[in-house]
Every structure is written in structure tokens, then in C-alpha cells.
Image (tube, grey):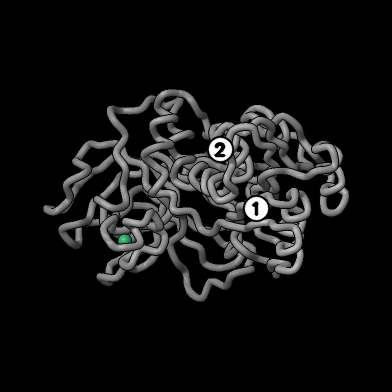
Amino acid sequence: MRATLIHGPGDIRLEEVPDPQIQVPTDAVVRVTASCVCGSDLWPYRGVRPTKRPRRIGHELIGVVEDVGSEVTTVRRGDFVVAPFALSDGTCAHCRHGVQTSCERGAAWGATDRDGYLVDGGQGEAVRVAMADGTLVAVPGHPDDAMLPSLLALSDVMGTGHHAALAAGVGPGQTVVVVGDGAVGLCAVLAARRLGAERVIAMSRHTARQAVALDLGADDVVAERGEEGVARIEELTGGVGADAVLECVGMKESMEQAIGATRPGGRVGYVGVPAGGAELPIAQLFSDNISVGGGVAPVRQYLPELLEDVLSGAIEPGKVFDVELPLSEVATAYTAMDQRTAIKTLLRP
Ligand SMILES: [Zn+2]
């Protein structure tokens, strides 16, 4: 089969690799229907994170189960499934606490698992899925084509936006600010709206992204950044600040902006992968009673609940995909994401 490998900065190649096979009885093999490029795939692509040797890449996928090991009980051949961005057994203490991203037997797409077998990267034609029962979530029936982008968004960005909203304690009646207009930030707008926020303010400078934010439920858009952005939020909230702020970038400046936009007693939920020296100003948090929560999103925990809303049509997170390409053009998909000409690129094998 064909799968994507990263060889180094700016060097993405689709190559012929061995077909995935069942290695242990808890495995499944899934034929990929669609996958995508994540903002975090850009760190090795830009050389921010080094690539020592060529390796598989991609961690968001949906597809059809092609084969299952003898101990797999929750999915069957022919099932349509959503795969979260991390693999987990579903049975250890951390999984039972709903923190599947800290699974004691956890594994990552495109890397070797604890049994020593490769878990294929998501940007390919098929994958071997370790711990299939704990990892995969079956979709009832066979979803139609129009629903695929929203199902794929459940693999990462929608669950991550939801995690930010939960961490910030978003609820009915609240004013919520979202920092970051990538696919996660846009999904965070939708998640805040879904949890009953009364007013959602999206911070974005890009016209196309502002339009998606408004489409997904934002009431206002603030284009200013940094101190100017904070001043604008203060103005829009009658000099008070927001009840909850969702930080979806991970940089020092975006965290400062998020904390600055929060009212005394309010909460920040952060899901941006920490980069660029982000740190917490404990004295400022102390004096204004601002709580900060969040981290890497246990998307697997939220998948059943969010899936139900996608299937009923209550939410359409797939709107964050604005470019679709065949897998053969995966290198172009990276370029588009890197140059921000695409919000999120969907790939079809
Ligand atoms: Zn576990």
C-alpha cells in the first residue's frame, strides 16, 4: 500500500510500504476513507521538531474495518470507524478516569507500540490499529459522503476544542473568548456554543477564518492581538473580561492574551501544544483568582457523545475543512497548511 513519510523539513513523500496485518489478537486493520493534516504535523515539517530518520506521519483518520484479531469485540469487519489521535487500551486506571491520552499502554500513530509492532501513520491507505477495542469508535450504519468531514473532525480538532471548553468551565449564560483561529480554535467556538455559552467572541485576523467562526456560532470577531486585543475584549464585555477563555494556539503571546482577556474569577482552558516559551504568571493568576486548566485532549473520552451530535446533525465540525486533495498530493496538502492558504486539508486515498 501507499503511505506518507516525512524525511525532513519540507520533505513529505508518498511511498510504497508493507500492507498492515493483524499482529496480536487485540488488533484491527482499517482501510482509510479519509485522513488529514494537523497543525502539529507542521512542527516536524517546519523543522521545529527534528526528524532523525524517515518516519510515517498522520494521526487523524476515519475508515472501514477490514480485519480484526480474535480478541476484538467492539468492532467488526465492515464497520465504519472513527479513530482518535492517540491509541489507548480503555481498561487501565487512566483510561477509566477518562484520561486516555495518559494510557499506561498508550501508543501513537506512525510509531512502534509496546509490543514492538508498527502502528501505521494515518496519512496512508490502511492502518494496523493496536488495542482496537479501546481505540476505535464504530459509527452506526454507513455514513453518507457529506458527513465524512464532520466524522473526521472527531478524530482530533472537535474533541480538542470541546476539551478547551470543558477545562474553562463553559456553561449557559457565559461570555466566552476563543484565542486562535486554526481548526481547533474554530471547533472551540462550536464547542462553546454547544455547551450553552450566551456569547462567543472569536479572535482572528483572517477573513476566511472569521467567516467560518461566525458560521460555527461566534457572535463577534476581534481582529486585534496582544494588548490591543485584550483592550477590545474589555470594551466588548463592559470593562469586565470574559467568563471563560479558550486558548487554542500554545504560544507565549497567545497565553498572555488569553489570561489578559479573562475576568477576575474566570477560567482559561488551554489546548494549544506549548511552544515558544509559554508559561503561567502565577502572581497575576493569584491576585485575580484566574484558574487555568487543560492539556492534551482525551478525544477518545468525548467521541461517543460528540458522534451522537454529528449523526443527529446538531453540530457540523467538518466545516473547518476547506481543501480536499487526493492522498497522491499529500505534499501539496502540507504546503497549503504551512502557508495558511488552507485551514485544514482533507486527504482521500
Ligand atoms: Zn489505558
Res 82 quadrant in image: top left
- Residue under circle 2? 191
Residue sitting at x 71%, y 64%: 286
Residue 65 visible, this orientation: yes
Nearer-the-camera pick, 77 or 291: 291
**Quick check: 116 left or right of 259?**
left
- Distance Cα–Cα, label 2 vs label 1: 15 Å
In this orientation, does residue 110 appear?
no
Left or right placement of residue 230 versus residue 107 in this view? right
Q: Nearer the viewer, residue 218 or 46?
A: 218
Which residue corresponds to the image point at 67% horizontal and 47% vertical from the top-left?
245
**Mark 1 residue type:** Val
Q: Which residue is drawn at 52% across and 43% down?
A: 162
- Left or right relative to 255: residue 43: left
Quadrant of the rendered structure where residue 9 is? bottom right
Q: How crowded is mark 2: few (under 14 residues within 10 Å), some or many (20 or more)?
A: many
Of residue 236 and residue 224, the one placed in the foreground of this image is 236
| Mark 1 burial class by Cα count in 10 Å: few <14, some 14-19, many 20+ | many
Indicate the position of residue 158 as horizontal and vertical percent values. 51, 42
At 45% from the left and 40% from the top, the residue drawn is 152
Give the image quadrant in which the ligand numbered 1 is located: bottom left
Where does the C terminus fall, quadrant-wise? top left
Residue type at the position of mark 2: Ala
Q: Is 283 situated left or right of 273 in this image?
A: right
> Vertically, is 45 above or below 158?
below
Task: Tell me which numbered mark, 2 or 1, is placed earlier along the sequence.
Answer: 2
Q: What residue is shown with label 1?
A: 268
Marker disc for residue 307? none
Residue 283 percent location from the top left of the image: 75, 68
- The mark closer to the camera, 2 or 1, is 1
